[in-house]
Amino acid sequence: MEDVLTELPPPSRFFQEDLDNFATPSPPLSSPSLLFSNPKPDQPLCPSLLIIALSSPSLYIFHHISSKTLIGSLVLPEIPFSGNSSEPSLGDKSCNIYALNDMDNLTLVVLVQCSISAERSSAVAKLLIGDQIIPKRVLIMDSVQSQNFRGKLAPDETYVFKLETSAERKGLDGDVCGGSSLLKGLDYFPSGSVLDGLAAALLARCQMRKIRGTLCVSWPRYGVYVVAMVKSLLQRNVLPGFDLSTIGDAKDKSSRLTSIKNYPFDSDMYT
């Protein structure tokens, strides 16, 4: 005779998705929003260049640029503020917006230091490139995802590729941004490879609004050599008026060692 107390129950006749129908649905998340330090800024903001840093190398570089001013933040209800430091830090889960101190042009930099889900990417892209921020040109900086890349990526080699909107490739609005490509001479992302998430949503947003947009992706995701390559690219093509030479060298070693516990770089980044 079977022991009903210790015998394993029979398999369920329902699929997991059928069982989920009986569960109470989660309440919908509130929409993300932009919060500016000036309650009544001169809106919309129309920067000549909007840089959105998603990759670890780009976040590291822009975090250490001193000539920038915090002007606002992107607020996501699902990202808690608990655990963040009082001053901006690489270990924070935040999405701060900075203005680079450039007298000639307004350049905004968004440091995305938190994970944005695929479901929220479109809403975030509409906020960063929408009615409140209307950029003339956009540069998105992300990392190559090895599982989405067609071909082999050697872990000891550094690569940088780009994707462009139609407006950027054709050199539209030459009187405003100049007719040449922002990352002139850089190889295009190989055909057959895939990019997704927030970076893809931002580039699609630029394409829809006919904005000159460039997506720059680097490999590997972490390491001193890829930081040096990205820094050189920014200095040469994007921010020639800024001195980035001291970022990541021996003079900056003390600040790098301070952030090692919270920042997900490989250990060779801090040696």
Image (tube, rainbow, N blue to C red):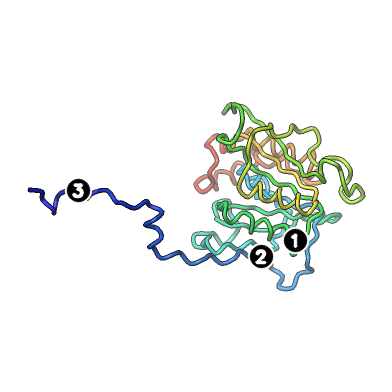
Q: Could you say which disc has been placed on residue 133 in the image?
A: 1
Residue 208 place in picture, x, y as percent: 75, 52
Q: Could you say which disc has been placed on residue 217 in the image?
A: none
In the picture, residue 43 is in which quadrant?
bottom right
- In the displayed structure, does residue 150 sit left or right of residue 134? left
In the picture, residue 131 is in which quadrant?
bottom right
Image quarter hosting the C terminus: top right
Residue 253 place in picture, x, y as percent: 60, 41
Between residues 167 and 65, which one lies in front from this camera angle?
167
- In the displayed structure, does residue 153 sit left or right of residue 232? left
Q: Which residue is mark 2?
A: 34
Alpha carbons under labels 2 and 3: distance apart = 53 Å
Task: Spot the residue most to the front.
Answer: 13
Q: Could you say which disc has been placed on residue 8 in the image?
A: 3
- Picture residue at 61% right of the left edge, 35% below the top: 224
| Residue type for callout 1 | Ile
Task: Spot the residue most to the right.
Answer: 175
Q: Is 58 rendered above or below residue 108?
A: above
| Residue type for callout 2 | Leu
Mark 2 or mark 3, which has the lower sequence index?
A: 3
Between residues 185 and 64, which one lies in front from this camera angle?
185
- Picture residue at 54% right of the left edge, 52% below the top: 91
